[in-house]
Image (cartoon, coloured by chain):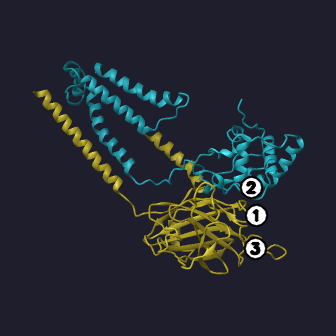
Amino acid sequence: MGSLTKPLILVVVIYLLLKFVVPNIPGSAPLPSSLIFLYLMLTVAGIVIYYTMSGESKDAFWGPIQRFLTGENIGALQTARYAVLILFPLLVGWQTYGSTAVSDAPPPENRTIHPAPPGEYTGLSNPVAKTPDNIMQGKGFYAAFCSPCHGGNFDGKGPAARGFNPPPANFSDPTTIAMLQESYLFWRIKKGGVGLPIEGMPWKSAMPRWEVELPDEWIWKIILGEYDGAHQSPRTWE
Amino acid sequence: MAATCVTVALLVAVCAPIYAQESVAVRAVMTKEPMPLDDPNAAVWSSAPQAQFPMSPQVHWQNRIQEVTVKDLKVRALNDGKQVAVLLEYADPTEDPADAAALEFMVGDTKAHFAHGQPMAQVEGGPVNIWFWRNKDGKGVDMSAKGFGTLKPQTHQDVTAKGAYANGTWKVVFSRPLTTDHPNEDTQLKPGEFINIAFAVWDGRKDAAGDLVEKGSQKAVSSWWYFRAEAPPDYSGYIYAVLAMGLALAFQFVLIRKLKKGQST
């Protein structure tokens, strides 16, 4: 089996690289299993081509496989052979079933939670001064207009939140307003769920379009109150 | 092996209550029994899996309401290849003439906002189809809307509805043929295909002054979930799997024969 060890190790190492190392390279992402499968098939094809280039290496490569599949008096390997011969068709059948059977799950939803805002809503600075008075006023507006869904504790768990899907944002979670600029919040509050681009699935959002009810100044004050109440700071570009 | 079985059984036991509590889809399973088109209490309903959806007071647009009676909605559905029937079940302490419930669907492939298909800034939306029932009317109304203030009954009525109140619980059944002749206004149900569904409920109680508490936009609502009329069982996946296994076996057979031949020469 000696000459098969190297190619086997190579395949395993490539798999581990693709599965665990590549996703951790900055700027990368986990690879879909179909892509990993494709890369492994390419690797195997490369190995087969390499070993069949000369007669010698071809025998060294195929010899052990041939012995494993057809050899006699090979002891425990005989059991392994039957296991492989039974498992291979089962695996093929299982894969085929998995890829052809009718799915029972609703269509997957890849909703972008914080899609890019329209150009006119990037880089606006809050025209309302961050004074204790304005923050207090903002919290008052928040309590009146936002807290039914986003919660008195800024945690997205207001009394009206339960029926909505997607759920209202939890501002105390560091992945929501702490990652966003005040300008972004101004856009989201003013234009509401229906202002989202298609990747934000605007048809599902219950966020009101507050521009029809609240003056801009109130919205800016609400933003001050939100950050203060949720103990977060807006994202800035250092 | 035994350990695996125990683990799987435990996982199922732990997960089952979670699934029962919150759902993402209503499945209108196939039935061969007569469809309970106007019978909320028919025994055949127990053969349909129950989905449960949380409801919110409608706070998305004016006029809002901050507190509503109905907080959860149980939904079952059946189809027989021609008709679909949907059963809503919810707790309501009193039976009132103005008690009402509605189903909402997107129409065709165009996305529509769950709030009556109101316009969206960056996406061209479509209309919604609403099936409405009210206790005092005793019938279903087939309606269309595309934006606030545009809700109106259609000129062709395809929906029937019937409610039954007992022991503090409303059971309301809506039914309609799976497809209609008006694909631009009515949702069309193709067996096996997921579509979007949303719900609304009004408790028709009155306050001390004799005014309705829940009316118009002041109601309990859900946002979009999924609905599917199940197709007859499809066994093609098994057939393809057996074919593939046969091919794999044949490949092994040929390979070993070839290798053995190679050895003997």
Label 2: which secondary element? helix
User: Which image quadrant for residue B163?
Assistant: bottom right
Q: Chain of mark 1?
A: B
Residue located 28% across and 49% down the image? B243
**Figure chain in cyan:** A
Q: Secondary structure at mark 3?
A: loop
Residue under the point 76% across and 55% down: A148
- Locate residue B234, reporting x and y percent: 37, 59
> Which residue is labeled 2 in the image?
A210
Q: Which residue is mark 1?
A: B65
Q: Is residue A163 left or right of residue B211?
A: left
Residues marked 3 and 2 touching at CB (< 8 Å): no
| Residue B69, horizontal then vertical, whole percent | 73, 66
Look at 61% across and 57% down and name the residue there: A203
Whether labels 1 and 3 share one chain = yes
| Residue at numbered disc 3 | B205
